[in-house]
Image: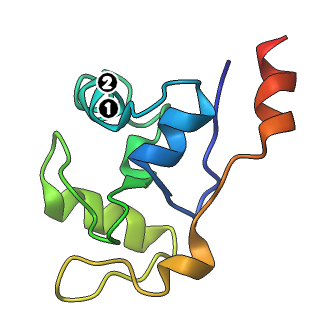
Amino acid sequence: MLARVPRGKVTTYGELAKAVGLKNGQRVIGKIMNKNPYPAIIPCHRVVLSTGDIGGYAYGKNVKAGMLAAEGVEILDSDRINNMDRIIHRFADNDVRRRQQ
C-alpha cells in the first residue's frame, strides 16, 4: 500500500496513520518518517503536525521548510503552514482500500 501526498500539499501524521490503518498511530508514523532512508523518493517532508506546525525533520526544520516552500507551500515565520485548511491532503477511504488490493 502506498499513500501519496501530492506536491504542494501536506498531510498530518494522524491522517497518514489513519490512511495506512494505524489507529492512533501518529507517533509510529513519526518514527517511521525519521528513519526514511529515501527522502527524495518518499517525500516525508510533506507530513506535518495537526496544529499546522511543520514539525521535525531528520535533516532539520530549515531543510523541511525549504523543501515545502520550493513546492509552493507557504511557511510563516512561526514555522507554521499558511492556509493549512486549503492545502491539507486527506486520503479517501476507497482510494486506500484500492491500493491495498
Residue at image point 48% right, 32% down:
42
> Which kind of residue does numbered mark 2 sit on?
Ile
- Furthest toward the front, the residue is 23
The image quadrant where one finds the N terminus is top right
Residue at image point 32% right, 32% down:
33
Task: Report how far apart the C-alphas of labels 1 and 2 lie in the structure.
Answer: 4 Å
- How many other residues sit within 10 Å of disc 2, few (<14), some (14-19) or many (≥20)? few
- Furthest toward the top, the residue is 101
Residue at image point 62% right, 59% down:
89
Where 61 falls versus 32 (above or below)?
Answer: below
Q: Are marks 1 and 2 in contact (CB under 8 Å)?
A: yes
Secondary structure under badge 2?
helix
> Which kind of residue does numbered mark 1 sit on?
Met
Residue at image point 27% right, 88% down:
76
Which mark, residue 32? Answer: 2
Give residue 29's position: percent from left, percent from top: 36, 31
Using residue 45 as the reference point, say whether residue 34 is left or right of it.
left
Using residue 56 as the reference point, say whether residue 46 is left or right of it.
right
Instruction: Find residue 38 and report its image quarter.
Output: top left
Where 40 falls versus 97 (above or below)?
Answer: below
Where 6 falls versus 82 (above or below)?
Answer: above
Using residue 96 as the reference point, say whether residue 94 is left or right of it.
right
Secondary structure under badge 1?
helix
Give residue 73's position: percent from left, percent from top: 47, 75
Give residue 56's position: percent from left, percent from top: 18, 51
Between 23 and 83, the one lying in front of the other is 23
Using residue 90 as the reference point, say whether residue 100 is left or right of it.
right
The image quadrant where one finds the C terminus is top right
Instruction: Find residue 62 and report its image quarter.
Output: bottom left
Which mark, residue 64? Answer: none
Q: Which residue is mark 1?
A: 33
